[in-house]
Image (spheres, grey):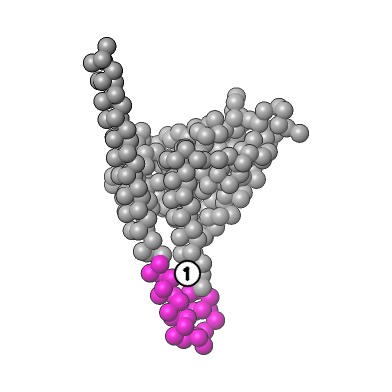
Amino acid sequence: MAIGLEKARSQEAANRAEAARQSQELKSTLLDAIAHEFKTPLTSIKAATTSLLSDPLSESAERGELLRVVEEEADRLTRLVTEALQTARIEAGKLQLNRELHSAGSLMATALGHVKALMEGRNVQVETAENLPPLFVDADLIQLAIRQLIGNALKYSLPTVPVTIAARATERGVAITVSDRGPGIPEDEQARIFEKFYRGSGDRHQVTGTGLGLAIAREVIRAHGGDVSVRSVPGQGSEFSISLPAAPEEKRV
């Protein structure tokens, strides 16, 4: 009996030590990723502001372009900070949901508005089915998840091909899909792309990012009782799907 208890205590201590090690490793990896990703936008902002300050009488078109660079890179920094904060909250078990009634269409429209810089010059098609059930969700978090999928599709597909975001009814609620005609994801990597910091092989590793976006999207959707899945054929493209339950009847007032 005593030996069994001692063994159980030893195992519990080992589990705590391993959890602490993994937590520390995550923090270190997260800091490294953020530091690396911050360098590019900060460098761009510094260069643009230096040009504006050194030549305050420059042509309005040139000033406009420099200010656009500052705005886009500032938005990029905001996205990076948001990813880091949400990851920390998820790891700490402190992801709080401020749920309200929303339509899938309004969530998609707001999410698209937040990635307008990425959409510039791109063919983004939006398809929303009629009579979709309402959703009882945290709008900010769901929009964050949708943005991650849209951003991925835009970054990994050629500028000349369309990206489609669609919403349709399901037995449980609503499915929001984001489809692209990018390089696709090898079958043996599809199960891992939702892991934190995982970056695929091939052309995908050339795209900037922390490797946190899809992991955050999955955790956010699962916290709402839904899930995220992917279907992909190498050379043909990918389709990511967010499944969310419909709002309970008692909330539809």
Query: Does 248 lie within the magenta span?
Result: no
Q: Quadrant of the N terminus?
A: top left
Question: Which of the 4 image quarters holds residue 129?
Answer: top right
Question: Which of 81/229 is in front?
Answer: 81
Residue drawn where x is 32% and y is 33% of the image: 16
Question: Which of 237/93 is in front?
Answer: 93
Residue drawn where x is 28% and y is 47% of the image: 202
Q: Position of residue 51 (x, y in %)?
A: 43, 80
Q: Position of residue 195 (x, y in %)?
A: 37, 39
227 over 182 or under it: above or below: above
Is residue 114 visible from the viewing direction of this image?
yes
Prevalent SS, magenta region: helix
Query: Does 61 lie within the magenta span?
Result: yes
Residue drawn where x is 23% and y is 16% of the image: 3
Magenta part of the chain: 42-66
Question: Which of 154/218 is in front?
Answer: 218
Q: Position of residue 233 (x, y in %)?
A: 37, 36
Point out the residue furthest to the front here. Answer: 2
71 over 103 or under it: above or below: below
Question: Which of 150/237 is in front?
Answer: 150
Q: Position of residue 160 (x, y in %)?
A: 45, 54
Point out the residue furthest to the left here. Answer: 3
Neighbours of disc 1 within 10 Å: few (<14), some (14-19), many (20+): some
Q: Quadrant of the C terminus?
A: top right
Report which residue position mark 1 lands on.
Answer: 69
**Lateral position of residue 230 relative to residue 134, left or right:** left
Assign a secondary structure to mark 1.
helix
Is residue 203 visible from the viewing direction of this image?
no
Q: The residue under label 1 is which amino acid type?
A: Val
